Image: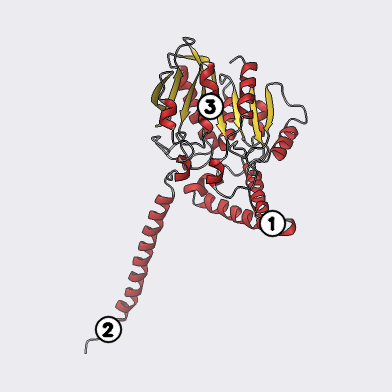
């Protein structure tokens, strides 16, 4: 009978262990790669503006599908130039909020509050998709707010070179997280003519998350100590996620850890361009009262003359007329959009000479 080599017996488990470890590494690598990619735009976004192509296909609009160089990547954009009017036109650039979304399908906000307001004033509109969204190259998850602000300024520079755009009359407008970005860009580049922040927070990102969680649970019926416990439980998970993202900066956790502690104080205190900060009365994500109180604190009760704030009555985060407690995205999209915001924008633009 042949003897079994004890060394051979010892090697077998080691090899099995090494093989299993290799398989585990491959699985983690595949998961990490997939998790780190820009996501697919959720279907409900497209329900917001099914008539996108129709809205930009008009004899009154010259539409140019463009690609904007920003660093080593190109960003997709659509430039809408009103026909007739001045030879050199002012322009505004619109950027979207957080997560996976595209300007072609953005809650109907773009048609009513951007195209509907600026184009009739002979002001061109440039929409830009963030990295990895639509036909834009790159990956928004690999950026922080400064990177997004740099991309936005690349769009400003693109317009400055356009033959029909007045380089001294280019403004920027952002919604939600985009409202964090526009003051950064404007504060760092005095050639930005104006900025409009639509429900952009004045509190830190961490505080904004806390406010959102609190309002979501309050809408579910929690209150008192039970409400505090629910919020704290979620924030504990967010703190763990931040530690994980710092150690392994992939996907949205990697992105989040780069923005959690961002504070818009410096951008707001240093921006010189005219700016309009718009809040929504029934906003669970960016509560008007808390953000206005923070705005007041930033300026010690004496805000500069170049900045104005306004709260739109009876509207949700997307400026649909509805209360704070939403049960579905479909409920939001079926509600009418506010006409009050249209008038606010019109009046402010008139004051700025547009």
**Which quarter of the figure has residue 275?**
top right
- Provide the residue designation for mark 3: 114
In this view, the residue in front, 307 or 78, is: 78
How far apart are the two marked residues, 2 and 1, measured between alpha carbons? 67 Å
Q: Residue at x 63, y 24 (%)?
A: 343
Extreme-bottom residue of the structure: 1
Of labels 3 and 2, the one closer to you? 3
Is disc 1 in contact with disc 3, using a CB cutoff of under 8 Å?
A: no
How far apart are the two marked residues, 1 and 3, measured between alpha carbons? 37 Å
**Which quarter of the figure has residue 289?**
top right
As drawn, is 139 to the left or to the right of 242? left
Mark toward the start of the polypeptide (2 vs 1): 2
**Which quarter of the figure has residue 226?**
bottom right
The numbered disc on residue 222 is 1
Is disc 2 in contact with disc 1, using a CB cutoff of under 8 Å?
A: no
- Provide the residue designation for mark 2: 4
Mark toward the start of the polypeptide (1 vs 3): 3
Q: Is the residue marked by circle 1 packed among few (<14), some (14-19), or many (20+) residues within 10 Å?
A: some
As helix, strand or loop, the secondary structure at mark 1 comes to: loop
Extreme-top residue of the structure: 87
Image coords of residue 252 (percent x, y) = 50, 47
Q: Residue at x 68, y 52 (%)?
A: 218
> Is residue 76 in view?
no
Image coords of residue 63 (percent x, y) = 40, 22
């Amino acid at each position: 009978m042949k003897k079994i080599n004890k060394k051979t017996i010892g090697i077998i488990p080691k090899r099995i262990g090494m093989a299993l470890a290799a398989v585990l590494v491959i699985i983690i690598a595949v998961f990490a790669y997939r998790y780190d990619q820009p996501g697919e735009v959720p279907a409900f976004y497209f329900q917001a503006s099914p008539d996108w192509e129709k809205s930009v296909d008009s004899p009154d609009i010259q539409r140019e599908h463009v690609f904007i160089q920003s660093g080593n990547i190109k960003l997709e954009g659509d430039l809408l130039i009103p026909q007739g009017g001045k030879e050199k036109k002012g322009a505004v650039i619109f950027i979207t909020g957080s997560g996976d979304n595209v300007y072609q399908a953005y809650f109907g906000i773009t048609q009513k509050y951007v195209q509907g307001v600026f184009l009739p004033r002979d002001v061109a509109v440039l929409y830009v998709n963030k990295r990895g969204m639509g036909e834009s190259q790159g990956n928004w998850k690999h950026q922080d707010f400064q990177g997004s602000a740099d991309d936005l300024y690349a769009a400003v520079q693109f317009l400055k070179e356009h033959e029909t755009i007045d380089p001294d009359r280019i403004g920027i407008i952002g919604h939600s997280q985009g409202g964090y970005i526009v003051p950064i860009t404007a504060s760092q580049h005095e050639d930005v003519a104006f900025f409009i922040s639509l429900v952009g927070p004045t509190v830190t990102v961490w505080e904004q998350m806390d406010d959102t969680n609190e309002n979501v649970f309050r809408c579910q019926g929690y209150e008192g100590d039970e409400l505090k416990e629910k919020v704290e439980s979620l924030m504990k998970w967010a703190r763990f996620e931040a530690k994980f993202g710092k150690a392994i900066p992939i996907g949205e956790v990697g992105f989040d850890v780069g923005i959690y502690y961002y504070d818009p104080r410096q951008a707001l205190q240093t921006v010189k361009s005219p700016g309009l900060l718009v809040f929504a009365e029934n906003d669970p994500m960016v509560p008007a009262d808390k953000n206005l109180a923070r705005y007041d604190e930033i300026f010690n009760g004496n805000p500069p003359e170049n900045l104005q704030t306004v709260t739109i009555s009876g509207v949700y985060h997307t400026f649909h007329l509805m209360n704070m407690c939403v049960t579905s995205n479909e409920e939001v999209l079926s509600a009418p959009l506010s006409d009050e915001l249209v008038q606010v924008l019109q009046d402010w633009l008139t004051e700025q000479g547009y």
